[in-house]
Image: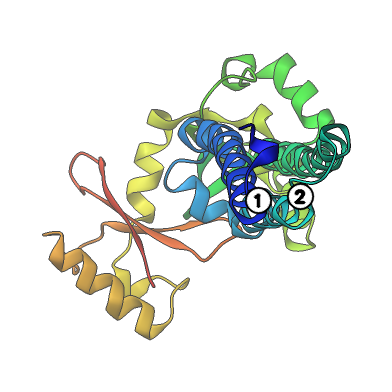
Amino acid sequence: RTILQERPTRFRLKVLGLHLLASAVALTLVLGTLYLGWYRWPGWYLADVLQVVTVLTGVDLAVGPLLTFVIARSSKPRRVLTRDIAMIVAVQLFALIYGAVSLWNGRPLYYAFSENVLQLVQAYDIDAHEWALARQRNAELVPHWYDLPRWIWAPLPQDSHERDRIVTSAITGGDDVISMPQYYKRWEQGLPALREQLKRVDDLGYFSGSDKKALKERMRAAGLATDQLNSMAFTGRGPPLLAVFEPASLKMKAIFKAK
């Protein structure tokens, strides 16, 4: 017997299973590629993309296959059934492409040390004008589309007028220096400045008292000192993280969540 000649319930379950499998494979390929390439820890957490991923997963692994289960009838002509399923798949593909483009446009490009904090820089944080300036003045640190996130130093410029302009812009909600790759420098060049900004966990202003307590417990469990100048906040669109460094070598030892 063909699949269309099977019992109605068994037929619908089989169609549901095939649709679910195909949806899971497509979603895994898209999210897996983005995660392994650009969103690996701590990018996924700092970018706070859970809402986009939840919608994608819901449409592709729940709504689509369930609609197929509802409309699948062994009594339907094959042409009609194919048309109905194709319409559902088209909606799924639209949602998948929309979600993938959103994740791509927000992919982590840099982890930047600037002033006294580590910050995530996503693709949509930098506008076309700043990219053009960076290609002219700092092409070495302008990524190709296939480049993975890199660690950089984003100091304020030495020119006092430009420095004041950027500070004023940041204070009033405009662009900060981390959105201006023309000023980026290699990570190694910023290590002396980074050393001066390391603090004890208790002295960091980005965490509540309960957060600091939890972070110190995690540090002790990992064998890291909690009373040294070895910590810096790591921020993005999600809740801040704690980056812990080896004070002597400035090698990053761990990144912790507060909750």
Q: Secondary structure under badge 2? A: loop
Residue at left offset 53%, top offset 30%: 33
Q: Secondary structure under badge 1? A: helix
Q: Position of residue 65 (x, y in %)?
A: 67, 50
Q: As shown in the figure, which amino acid type bears the numbered disc 1? A: Arg
Q: Is residue 208 left or right of residue 110?
A: left
- The 10 Å Cα crowd at callout 1, few under 14, some 14 to 19, many 20 or more, is many
Residue at left offset 87%, top offset 36%: 83
Residue at left offset 59%, top offset 39%: 18
What label does residue 12 carry, if any?
A: 1
Residue linked to disc 2: 73
Q: As shown in the figure, which amino acid type bears the numbered disc 2? A: Arg
Q: Earlier in the sequence, mark 1 or mark 2?
A: 1
Q: Position of residue 252 (x, y in %)?
A: 28, 44
Q: Is residue 32 visible?
A: yes
Q: Is residue 157 left or right of residue 77?
A: left
How many circles with numbers are drawn on the protein? 2
Q: Position of residue 158 (x, y in %)?
A: 62, 36
Name the quadrant of the C terminus.
bottom left
Q: Is residue 156 visible?
A: no
139 in relation to 167, above or below: above
Q: Are marks 1 and 2 in contact (CB under 8 Å)?
A: yes
